[in-house]
Amino acid sequence: MDAPTPPANPHFARLGGHDAVVRLVDAFYNAMDTLPEARTIRAMHETDLGPTRRLLVKYLSEWMGGPKLYTPDRGAPMLRRRHQPFDIDASARDAWMACMRHALATTCVDEDLRAELDAAFYKIADFIRNTEPHGAARAHPGRPREQHPQQVAAPHSSMAPTAPDAS
Ligand code: HEM
């Protein structure tokens, strides 16, 4: 009998499935609530982080190759467009990454996976950046390479060669 085909993007399973994604997202928003360098980006969010937590769990589940929970609920991710109302410059990106790095450090024991996810998150966070340091709007950087969770992960879907989900 043939061996079962491995999932195109194994990160969801490698991280530990749904419960692990929930732990990562909880740790991420807890970091956003407490890290001094995250104050500015925390202020961009609603006081109640509950709905945003649930959306990030859905998004990451899909993006990491797990159940497609986000698209049926919200449609195509179009993350750059969805973040357009907020002024996201390099320091906002770095603050977001600081929270995510904190979350990965406390919830993901696999060092290789942590490094892969870190690189993949950075690509998205930098793609979302829409404001130059002096406050001017940053031009759209072109079609993203990091937005297609279904494409073969080599090593992560975020590094897939094409991404139809630009915006
Ligand atoms: C670069 C720095 C980033 C900042 C400052 C930022 C900020 C925000 C804010 C203010 C919201 C709205 C939440 C609310 O109203 O409570 C949001 C939503 C969201 N963010 Fe980010 N974000 C960043 C990067 C990212 C990255 C890298 C990802 C994905 C890996 C992401 C995924 C999401 C998702 C899935 C939502 C919900 C979208 C929806 O409405 O369906 N964000 N973000």
Image (cartoon, rainbow, N blue to C red):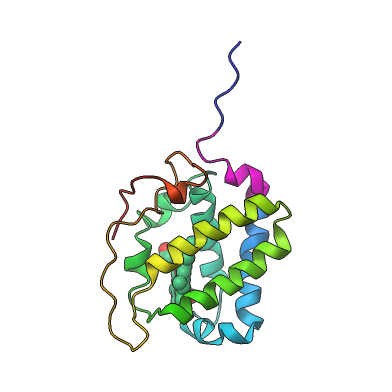
Q: Is residue 140 left or right of residue 91?
A: left
Q: Residue at x 47, y 74 (%)?
A: 93
Q: Nearer the viewer, residue 93 or 63?
A: 93
The image quarter containing residue 160 is top left
Residue 34 at what x, y percent from top left?
A: 66, 82
Q: Nearer the viewer, residue 127 or 60?
A: 127
The image quarter containing residue 29 is bottom right
Quadrant where the C terminus is found in the figure: bottom left
Residue 84 at what x, y percent from top left?
A: 33, 74
Q: Is residue 80 left or right of residue 39?
A: left
Q: Is residue 45 left or right of residue 127?
A: right
Q: Residue at x 43, y 42 (%)?
A: 150
Vertical arrangement, residue 2 with respect to residue 137, above or below: above
Q: Is residue 130 left or right of residue 41?
A: left
From where the camera sits, is residue 27 visible? no
Q: Residue at x 38, y 73 (%)?
A: 129
Q: Nearer the viewer, residue 90 or 63?
A: 90
Q: Residue at x 61, y 56 (%)?
A: 115
Quadrant where the N terminus is found in the figure: top right
Residue 7 at what x, y percent from top left?
A: 54, 34
From where the camera sits, is residue 2 visible? yes
Vertical arrangement, residue 43 with respect to residue 30, above or below: below
Say if the magenta span includes residue 16: yes
User: What segment is highlighted magenta in the picture?
Assistant: 7-19
Residue 157 at what x, y percent from top left?
A: 46, 46
- Give the dominant element type of the magenta stretch: helix, strand or loop: helix
